[in-house]
Each structure stands twice: as C-alpha cells, then as structure tokens.
Image (spheres, grey):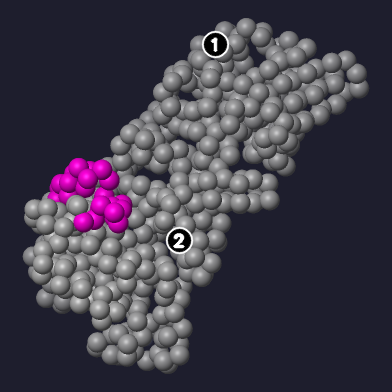
Amino acid sequence: MLATIPSATLLGVEGRPVAVEVHVSQGLPGFTLVGHPDPVCREARDRVRAALLSSGLTWPMKRVTVNLAPGLLRKVGPGLDLAIAIGLLVATGELEADSVAGCAFLGELGLDGSLRRVPGIVPMVGVLEARVVVVPFDCVAEAAVVGRMRVRAAGRLAELVACLRGDEPWPGPPSASAAAPSAAVRPDLADVRGQPVGRTALEISAAGGHHLLLSGPPGAGKTMLARRLPGLLPPLVGDDALVATTIRSAAGEPLPPGGLVVEPPFRAPHHGASAVALIGGGTAWMRPGEISQAHGGVLFLDEMAEFPRAVLDALRQPLEEGVVRVSRARASVSFPARFLLVGATNPCPCGEAGPAGACRCPDAVRQRYNRRLSGPLLDRFDLRVVVSRPDVADLLGGPPGESTEVVAARVAAARERARSRGVTCNAELSVGVLDAVAPLTDAARAILEHQLRVGALSGRGLHRIRRVARTIADLAGAGDVVDEDHICLALGLRADVVAPEVAA
Ligand SMILES: [Zn+2]
C-alpha cells in the first residue's frame, strides 16, 4: 500500500512543501528513509516507532520505505515525524485514506506519542495547499497567522487518530494563557532625566531611520536610551509585520499574543555571542540570527568595540541591502535583515576618556580600542553623539522628559512626510533626489562647502548630512528648504566620537 501525505520543511525563513510517500510491502521487516533527510530527520524512524507503540497502534512487521519528495531538497529537523506516522497508518490500513484527504501534517513526535512544537510553522504552513493543516497544540496560534486554511490541533498521536477516524470530536482551542506569554511593558522615554543630546539623537534616528552611535562613559544611560527607540518607531503593518512574524517563527521563538509581530523588535546580542547567533546559519539548521530577528526594529550593539571584527564587518552588507546571505556547505539562504542599528561604545577601555580626562589607559591601548570601530562601519552611522552622565540635579528631581507617546507622534508625522517622497524614511533617499527634496538655503550651502574644503566632510558624508538635515527640518515642521540651523545640528550630531584626539 502507498500513502502520500503533504507536509513541509524549513529552509532559512522559507517553507518548502514536502510530499511524504510511505510504501508498505511484504518482505523482510525493515524501515528505509530516503529523500535527503538530515541526521535529525533521519532519526524519525525511532521516534515514530516508539510513538506508535506508546499510542496503542501497531508497527508493521513489513517492509516500509519512506520517501521525502522532492529528493534534492534537504529536509531538516523532526517536523516531518507526524506526516510519516500518519502516512504509515494509512499505508497499513489503520487509517482510511479518505480520513486524511485534504489534510497536511506538521510536528515532532515524542516517544510517548505526544506532539511537539517545531520552529517555522508560519512559513511552512504558508506554502501548503491543503484545506486543513494539523499541528501540535503549541503551534495553533502560529498556524492561524497564515489564515488561509482550517487549523486542527492535537496533543497526542492517539487523540489525533481518534479524531481522524471520527471516534472523537476535534478538541477546541487551548486556553489563551497557555499559548503565549503576555506582552511586556515597553520602557517609556519619560523615565530618561536630562540627556538633551541623547533624546534629540534618538528622535531623529527614529524619524529618519538613521543609524545611531552613542559614545560615553559607563552609567551615561546609553542602554537606557537605546531601549526606548523601538517605542518611537511606527508599529509594523502589512508585509512588514508578516515578515517579522515569519522570522520569529523560523527562529523558534514564541509569537506575541494575537500572533502577528506588530511591535518593532529590539535585539541586544552580547558581544560574546557567536557569529552564527548574530548573523545566522548553523550546521544543523539555518536559523535566522539576531540581525534578522531585529528586522523592522532595532539592533543594539552595546560595547560595540568588543564585538569580533568579523562580526562587525559582516554587518556591512545587510546595512547596505537589507538582507544577509549565509552560505554553508549544504545550503545558501538569504535572511531579511533591515534594522536600525544602534551602537554604544565607551570612549576607551576604562570608559573615562574625554574632556574630563580621568582616563588611565595607555595611549596604545586606547588607540587599538578605537581602531576597532574605525573605517567603513563607523561611516554607516549618520548620527554619532557623545552622551555624558546625567546631572545630579536632573536625577534627583528634574522635570520628567517628554513621553514616548508625544515624541512618537512627531516621528510618525515626519515619516508621513518621508512617504510623500516615495520612501519609508529619509535615510533611504537616493543621492539623485536630494536636490529636489532637500534644497539648501545659500547659508546652508556655504557651511557645507566650507566643511568639504577643509576636509571635514567626505562626499558620502555630505549626502548623509543632507538626509539627516532633511529629517531635522521635517521634525521641526519646516518647509521644503533645509536651512543652516538644520545643517549645523546635523553636523553637530556627527561627532568624531572615537577619534584618538577626542580622548587626548
Ligand atoms: Zn581609559
């Protein structure tokens, strides 16, 4: 007897349909699994066998061949377990072929017959063409995000078989509390006392999509500021929300209540994390990295100079293109990775370098530390600001700053103006349109000319300054023309935060 059960596997953040063909015939008892399974997928035999026996079902004493088609596609992980088990039951006649018609199956099996969650349910369900998809209970919310088909769920294989046979009704949806963690409260900008420069830079960064580097001693509140940036960004909608949801699902992380990821994510990987964890990939499973999980939100690199040089270099391509390509021996995949980069750095290893001059680091150490951030990556930051420790008076009872809600409203208005120029934010404005959408007053032009003449600004730097100045003008509600005040502020927010002479 032959049975074919639709299922899917994961390649990066994309699902790929898989047809699980199970053939049972007379002959020496045995089980062969073909069709390019990875080692984890190959172990399905042992899991399926134990799960069937634990569920009171029979393991056929016959010749069993399972083929996972298409053969050239590598099948990763245990997600095909359930489809293999169902295929076996149909091929041996324990289940009627009619009872599974139009159904696709996804899920891992435990030895006790329980159904377990697998990563990537959203993209995998997305490529299925079945009318009904059957998943483990833990995956119902993820499967429902796709919304095209009926989602059925079960907790155990025995239960599922009873439902398919029509002996038992399908169980209702699980209680909401078990399905998803409750949403965390976002930190508010009103908690930040003082810090006028940091707040201004944060607002401009959010409004224009400008990457931001914060430099300052420990305790200056760099992390506190960065954590409040996602709250200023507009919520994710449409395709952006679906892509962010797909990435989170493919990474095996739980989805927020309601399924769709609508809050811009905030990811803050530690500098000790592996390159694979940050960029993506892996030998067993091509998992999206931190930079992809930050897609649509903020990637915060604290103590940026401590990150391995190779990781920082690997950021340049996604910063340019919004995707990261990861190649391994067995596969090459692209992960979406369009994020707002916020870096934080101490001015030197001890953190005390700067105008106050309490630094005790040897010159060579300080210079080596700063060199790690020099060059092309530093150039990607449109905003580079120095933040200092807040005033004692501010900490002890200064007036609370503007709230996230107030600033986010200005950011939304500025982004609305950017949209009228055909981009989502000003950082995306191409060089060719700058003269049209950000014309300069004579005074503003003179300032830039001077900066170029004395070598304080490169050609690329000039365009970045003009984009930031456009954002500043938008936030100020100014007209179409960018004036000298906007240019001066943009220049002031692009300090040489890590140049050795600052620390001297
Ligand atoms: Zn120092």
Q: In this picture, which residue range is highlighted in magenta?
A: 408-435
Q: Which residue is mark 2?
A: 316
Residue 455: give x, y in percent of width and height: 29, 79
What secondary structure is found at the residue carrying circle 2?
A: helix
* Dominant SS in magenta: helix
For ligand 1, give the image quadrant.
bottom left
Name the mark on residue 168: 1
Q: Residue at x 10, y 70 (%)?
A: 443
Q: Position of 4 compared to 465: left or right?
A: right
Residue 215 among magenta residues = no
Work out whether 82 lies above or below 236. Answer: above
Nearer to me, 445 or 326:
445
Q: Residue at x 24, y 65 (%)?
A: 465
- Label 1 sits on what residue type? Glu
* Quadrant placement of the N terminus: top right
Q: Residue at x 46, y 73 (%)?
A: 306
Residue 331: give x, y in percent of width and height: 64, 45
Determine if the C-beta at disc 2 is less than 8 A from ligand 1.
Answer: no
